[in-house]
Amino acid sequence: MAETEPESLDEFIEQSLGHFGWKHFIQSILVSLSLFFDSQQAFIGIYSDANPTWHCTNSTICSLDSDICKLPKSAWSWDGPSSMSIISQWGLECANSFISGLPQSSFFMGSFIGGILLATAADSSLGRKNLLFLSCFLMSLTSMAIVFSTNVWIYSALKFLIGFSRSTIVTCALVLKTEKVSKKWRFRVNIVAFFTFALGYLSLPAIAYVNKDSSWKYLYLWSSIPAICYSILAYFFVTESPRWLFMQGREEEAMKILKEIAPTEDGGMLASRLLEVPLKPKAPSADFFSSIGELFGKMWATLRILAVMVITFGIGMVYYGTPLGVGNLGFDIYLAVIFNALLEIPSFIVTYLLENCRRRYSILSLTSISGICSILCVVVGNGVKGAKIWLELASFFCACTANNVCVIYTMELFPTCVRNTATALARQAGVFGAVFCPFLISAGRRNDLFSFGVFGVIILCCGIFVAYLPETKGVALSDTMDQQESKESTTM
């Protein structure tokens, strides 16, 4: 059956991207690889900032139940080399919660600030591809430089810069992938990105185990060098979003990309079909923050992005907090991280199965279950052996799935002209929630109420805000704010 002639730029792009071929697949894989290295930096602190195990060297005054801070240095020793963690290398085992949680909190604070300041760059001047390359490349260079840290203050400052550099990687990658396929495929290609993120997370226990008797600095070297190579590869072979190019008035570049990824028999028809389409591209804007003005210039968009940010704040607390807090559960840290990382894979399957479900109900159900399981970690305490780790895994699994659905949901809620900005702001709200996690986890070493209890209550309360958002299942993407308003007014 022949396709109807497109009546708008949006329909033209949808029809042009309707086929999913091997070129789409290669581009999807190339863009998704950035999340592999991003996840390594997000969770590398589980090992580099871990509190190592120790043993007594003087049994007359020392036992494993003793408070290490009240024992003389001669009475105990680390189980491995002191360089295996920043805690043991710089003598931070008795530091307060602020000092021990500062490096990882600095990382998330850098991610938050960078995400806010750079949120509009991909929608205005730089575009999706260039910002993705710069973010990944600068993150890798800073990660390599961190091995020269000589104290916790320099280390924390560099962690802040790593977080700042990588703040837009996930957003740019997901938006770029979404805008290069039709609505039929956008949910599925993002599953590939989530899967790649999980593989990066899963690679950490392997790297850490191989280097368990070596310095924590090797963790950063083994993760940063391949990331630099990938960044260079991405710069030359990843293509820009045709939707963004059209919105910037760069029709020739957009058409070239569409012809390259379209099937051979359709490539020659694109130019003639485009002549029949009423184009309304946006003139390139020199204002770096122009998309912020567009987003907050509409009351409906302002209320919408605020609601999304509250939801992602709660999800971020659990998504980042529970994996970082597995060391407090009295379980093997290598197995705990492996279990958490492996759960990302079935969460993608569940995310895929939820493609035909309502986004709002899915997010509300997942956040509720996650919050309840997190609170139960506090309730059961240490009374039931192994119960805490299973509840933590259940809480993380639901938060992970909710995060996946919420990312896709956010991209569907906003048009092309502000999509990257809105998605970045939503993501940074989740990262902002993670800023507090290291301090709560440090306090939670004495009482789980301050960590898992707080995580559960917050995600429960924040998940309720999804009730204020519209449903987007099966809705085609819009390019301008006016199109979004018009499309939603006709479906109400």
Image (cartoon, rainbow, N blue to C red):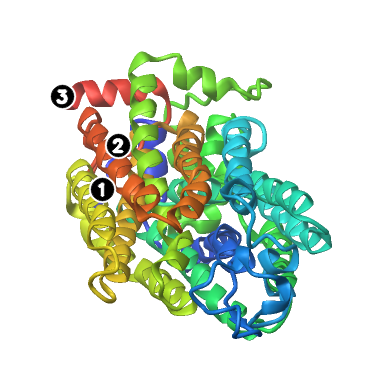
Q: Are marks 2 and 1 in contact (CB under 8 Å)?
A: yes
* Residue 278: image location, x then y, percent: 43, 26
Of 51 and 42, the residue lying toward us: 51
Q: Amino acid at mark 2?
A: Cys
- Confirm whether residue 408 shows in the render: no
* Residue 98: image location, x then y, percent: 60, 46
Residue 150, by quadrant, is bottom right
Q: Secondary structure at mark 2?
A: helix
Question: CA–CA distance between discs 1 and 3?
Answer: 27 Å
Q: Tell whether 301 sits left or right of 416.
A: left
Q: Tell whether 203 sits left or right of 303.
A: right
Q: Earlier in the sequence, mark 1 or mark 3?
A: 1
Residue at 25% across, 30% down: 469
Residue count near mark 2 (Cα–Cα under 10 Å), binned few <14, some 14–19, many ≥20: many
Q: Which mark is residue 367?
A: 1
Which mark's residue is nearer the viewer, 1 or 3? 1
Of 472 and 258, the residue lying toward us: 472
Q: Which mark is residue 492?
A: 3
Q: Secondary structure at mark 1?
A: helix
* Residue 272: image location, x then y, percent: 47, 41
- Confirm whether residue 228 shows in the render: yes
Q: Which mark is residue 159?
A: none
* Residue 296: image location, x then y, percent: 45, 18
Residue count near mark 3 (Cα–Cα under 10 Å), binned few <14, some 14–19, many ≥20: few
Which mark's residue is nearer the viewer, 3 or 2? 2
Q: Which mark is residue 462?
A: 2
Please, is residue 270 above or below residue 51 in the view? above
Please, is residue 42 above or below residue 59 in the view? above
Q: Secondary structure at mark 3?
A: loop
Residue at 52% across, 61% down: 32
